Image: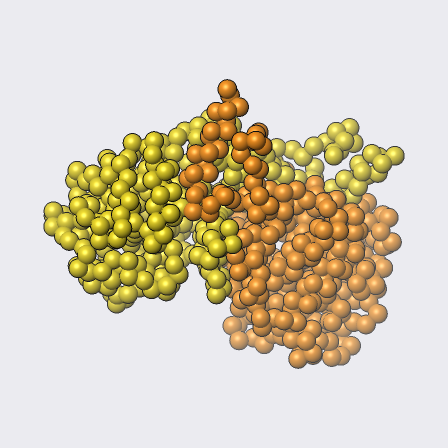
Chain colours: A orange, B yellow
């Protein structure tokens, strides 16, 4: 390692706080999953309320037959953030995650990163926080029952988010693979939620005021058909989130009032890709800001066509950055070269060699 | 930490090889700076020769008054790579680097990262490798003398690259700050290069077959005026690399044959931003592939209008990935959540809590 006498350790400038998977789990456990989701939702709402101050770009994808890798950058003019995230539905068969990610926050004034963190777990939390926040404005008042079609990795977090933020007490779970539903029920056993494992999607949505669809196949699928969906519900459509991947029959969309994050992104990636370019939608930030109505009647079907947007990750990154001083659950990563003289990068490499030579002597 | 009996350590799938600044310096010293530059240049040439197989996007910038943060993604259809890099000229005043960076390589088929590395040092190496590779095709045969205008962090690497790959023996150094030239001369004292510190840019280019301009100010500057530049030289223009930042008088460009990486990027960021949209340029990959001529006469002024392109970083990342098994200078970063059951992300968080509870007991 570095001999302190010959070569002082890198200064604090060289280190970037890093939250590993292990540290992320410690942070979340310290706070509690539900409280973390609520906290992230607050940050998301704050950032949606200052929507117009953000640099909003559609994400930058790299497509492969098996899936997609995306970079999702954004900035509020002071802080820059981006997430790297993949979506590979076939990964599960090889024991890999469908979605993994990591993210970075930086100071725009210096370009220096101030946080580097895993975002597989954090994305799961922010996706649930985003859904529950939207549902607070859109779901029928007094909703107590939520159907979840698709009981994979995101379903636990959705259940806990809706319990904590909406007062949902009953989960009606359906998955094409019953083992997935059993897994979900087991994990939620001590959560305070009642979980009913259902044999069909029709069973699952029976009596539900909120229907969450969160399946993973990368294709046009019809998880919900039109005749299954009655009036007066809120649909939280998570799984239709990339080109060629949808979950709902088009006729449901035509009966719904559709709420989106960034319209130009949702039209490419969301359920909305089934409808004409000019189909009217409402931007969620306008609902939060009181500039557009949310739910206006008991009979209305509201639909959150969720695809995930960079500002949500930005908010989640800000939440973690602000949390770290309280928990201390992070490492410092030697990521930035920090020569004594900033112009002397090569000299730093040269000097580091002298240290090794001295140690060898 | 993790108790092995209760919670097995994350599998190999969860870890991403990480090259810290310290490890990058070890890797480069193990190989030698010059040999590393030559190696990276070979990878760059390989990747330029298969230019058409790459997904080429202009980089994605986030601008601030003080500088810019850029994401530079690319893919060859099998591997995805990107670099995060900033450019903040005023950083030096605060003891920070003008340019820092880090980068990632991933398998496109799974979306999983296979390398995460510092790229401040690696960018310095790849920029020098890119310049020397271009000069191999463009500089006058038998060039021995190179002027370097701007003696900051990149100048050492340029000097060593041109020594190793072109046979340059004489460096004529000029900087607005003489201390910068003295720093450069000191670092190159044992390199086998003769370094002459010059009082003016005119002195520096006296007798030089290659002129490298690599200043850092973020503005339209005129480091070289037209009457300074004679015929039969190669100009290696590094510093004009973002909108609003150029180094050469427009009239020099009009007398030169201009070679570029990706035309649409260079027209926005390079010296080329001074010329009309349709000014003819030659793409370097076509020169390397024998599809377009490089230098064709002794009197010709050739100009490499370097702005840096994602494929060069991709090649540098590949070089480091392939180097690591030989040197072993890397760590493993716990970056990817890896539950036993990929669907059971929440269960992993739950179980990790049980471990802490057991330890506390």
Q: Nearer the viewer, residue A71 or B295?
A: B295
Vertical position of residue B47 compared to residue A351: above or below:
below
Point 25% across, 57% down: residue: B224
Whole-percent x, y for residue B355 in the image: 80, 36
Residue A97 visible (yes or no) = no
Whole-percent x, y for residue A348 in the image: 46, 38
Vertical position of residue B152 compared to residue B221: above or below:
above
Left or right: residue B81 versus residue A270 is: left
Q: Nearer the viewer, residue A125 or B23?
A: B23
Point 36% across, 38% down: residue: B186
In this view, which residue lies farthest toward the top? A361
Vertical position of residue B130 compared to residue B165: above or below:
below
Point 25% across, 62% down: residue: B249
Point 41% across, 29% down: residue: B31
Vertical position of residue A2 compared to residue B256: above or below:
above
Q: Nearer the viewer, residue A213 or B323?
A: B323
Left or right: residue B220 versus residue A265 is: left
In which quadrant of the rendered image does the N terminus of chain A lie? top right
Within the image, what quadrant is residue A200 found in?
A: bottom right
Tell me how many marks there are.
Answer: 0
């Amino acid at each position: 390692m570095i001999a302190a006498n010959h070569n002082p350790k890198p200064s604090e400038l060289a280190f970037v706080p890093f939250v590993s998977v292990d540290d992320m789990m410690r942070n979340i456990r310290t706070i509690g999953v539900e409280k973390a989701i609520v906290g992230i939702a607050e940050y998301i709402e704050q950032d949606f309320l200052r929507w117009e101050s953000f640099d909003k770009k559609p994400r930058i994808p790299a497509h492969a037959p098996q899936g997609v890798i995306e970079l999702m950058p954004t900035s509020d003019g002071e802080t820059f953030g981006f997430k790297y995230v993949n979506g590979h539905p076939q990964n599960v068969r090889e024991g890999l995650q469908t979605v993994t990610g990591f993210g970075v926050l930086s100071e725009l004034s210096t370009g220096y990163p101030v946080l580097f963190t895993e975002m597989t777990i954090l994305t799961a939390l922010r996706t649930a926080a985003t859904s529950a926040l939207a549902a607070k404005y859109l779901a029928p008042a007094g909703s107590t029952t939520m159907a979840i079609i698709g009981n994979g990795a995101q379903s636990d977090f959705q259940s806990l988010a809706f319990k904590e933020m909406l007062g949902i007490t009953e989960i009606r779970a359906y998955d094409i693979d019953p083992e997935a539903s059993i897994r979900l029920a087991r994990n939620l056993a001590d959560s305070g939620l009642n979980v009913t494992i259902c044999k069909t999607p029709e069973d699952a949505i029976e009596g539900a005021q909120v229907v969450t669809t969160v399946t993973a196949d990368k294709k046009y699928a019809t998880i919900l058909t039109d005749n299954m969906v009655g009036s007066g519900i809120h649909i939280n459509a998570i799984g239709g989130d990339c080109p060629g991947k949808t979950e709902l029959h088009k006729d449901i969309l035509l009966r719904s009032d559709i709420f989106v994050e960034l319209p130009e992104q949702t039209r490419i990636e969301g359920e909305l890709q089934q409808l004409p370019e000019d189909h009217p939608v409402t931007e969620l930030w306008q609902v939060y800001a009181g500039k557009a109505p949310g739910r206006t009647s008991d009979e209305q079907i509201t639909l959150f066509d969720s695809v995930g947007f960079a500002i949500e990750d930005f908010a989640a990154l800000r939440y973690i950055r602000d949390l770290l001083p309280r928990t201390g659950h992070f490492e410092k990563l030697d990521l930035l070269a920090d020569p004594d003289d900033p112009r002397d990068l090569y000299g730093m490499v040269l000097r580091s060699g002298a240290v090794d030579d001295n140690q060898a002597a």
